[in-house]
Each structure stands twice: as C-alpha cells, then as structure tokens.
Amino acid sequence: MPEPAPLILLVDDDVDFLDINRQVLEPRGYRVVAVTDPVAAWERIQQEPPALVITDLMMSALDSGFSLTRRLREDPRFGALPIILVTAVSSSLGLDFRPRTPADLAALGVDAFFDKPVRPQALLDKVAELLARGRPETP
C-alpha cells in the first residue's frame, strides 16, 4: 500500500495566508491542515504528527510562533520535526529579523525562515528540501 502524502501543518491567524498556501501545497500532493493559533496547532499535532510545520511568528502574542517552536523542540517526540517560520515582522514593525546563518536559524529553533509574502516556488522548494532530509520519527 502506498505511503500517505506528507502532512503539512499551517499555523497562522491570517486566514488568507492559510488559504493561499493550502492552494500552493495541495496541488503538489501534500496533505494540509490549517489552524489559526498555536493552541489548536499543539492539539492537532497530538492527533496526527505532521511531517512539517509552517508557522507564523506573530499571532495571539508577538512570540506565538516562538512559543510553539520551543514547545515542539523541547518535546522528544517532535524535536526533529522540520519547522518553517514565516513572518511579516520586517514589514509591519520595521525590524530586520532575518536570520543570516545556519546558527541564526538554530538559535530560532527553526529550519527555514521566510518574510511574508512568501514566493510560492521558494516555499515549495524549501518544503521539498526539508522533507527529503527524512521524516522525523513519530510517537
């Protein structure tokens, strides 16, 4: 029996971002679950661990994405789960928040970073790259 398509969890309070990126990912064969806050994301992850998480930084709080990422990294079941952080912090707050090195990404607890808006092909390429590294073990 064929292996199910990789599940990608999208976490963002911007429903337009969720809809657009679902339309980018699903035609490429990914299963997508979209939630609007980190609490719902954590609950969903408990039900079926995704192959990859794409999360916003600023949701219910300025550091919502960091809180979710930290929680995932601290849990041995999900510590190796690939995480992509997307944010509009640069454009909305005028902060230069971009990690410039792999060490910067590691300090953030993520595998990749994108400013919003995300170019669809760049996102697809990064998702494919991270998934090709191997699926994390699930509980």
Image (cartoon, helix red, strand yellow):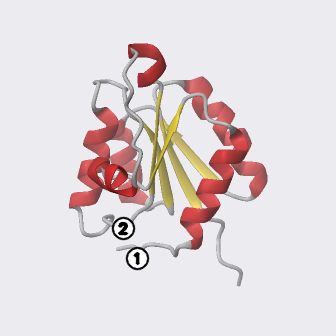
User: Is 110 positioned to the left or the right of 88 in the image?
Assistant: left
User: Is 18 positioned to the left or the right of 135 in the image?
Assistant: right
> Farthest residue in the bottom direction?
1
Q: Amino acid type of disc 2?
A: Ala
Q: Which disc number belongs to residue 85?
A: none
> Farthest residue in the left direction?
74
- At 23% from the left and 62% from the top, the residue drawn is 75
- At 33% from the left and 64% from the top, the residue drawn is 78
Q: Which residue is mark 1?
A: 137
Separation of disc 1 and disc 2 at Cα? 8 Å
Q: Look at the picture and state if 128 lies above or below 124.
A: below
| Label pair 1/2, CB-CB below 8 angstroms | yes
Image quadrant for the C terminus? bottom left
Q: Look at the picture and state if 39 lies above or below 47.
A: above
Q: Which residue is mark 2?
A: 80
Q: Residue 54: give x, y in percent of width and height.
A: 49, 46
Q: Residue 121: give x, y in percent of width and height.
A: 72, 46
- At 44% from the left and 23% from the top, the residue drawn is 90
- Tell me the SS state at disc 2: loop
Mark toward the viewer: 1 or 2: 2
Does label 1 or label 2 sit earlier along the sequence? 2
- Tell me the SS state at disc 1: loop
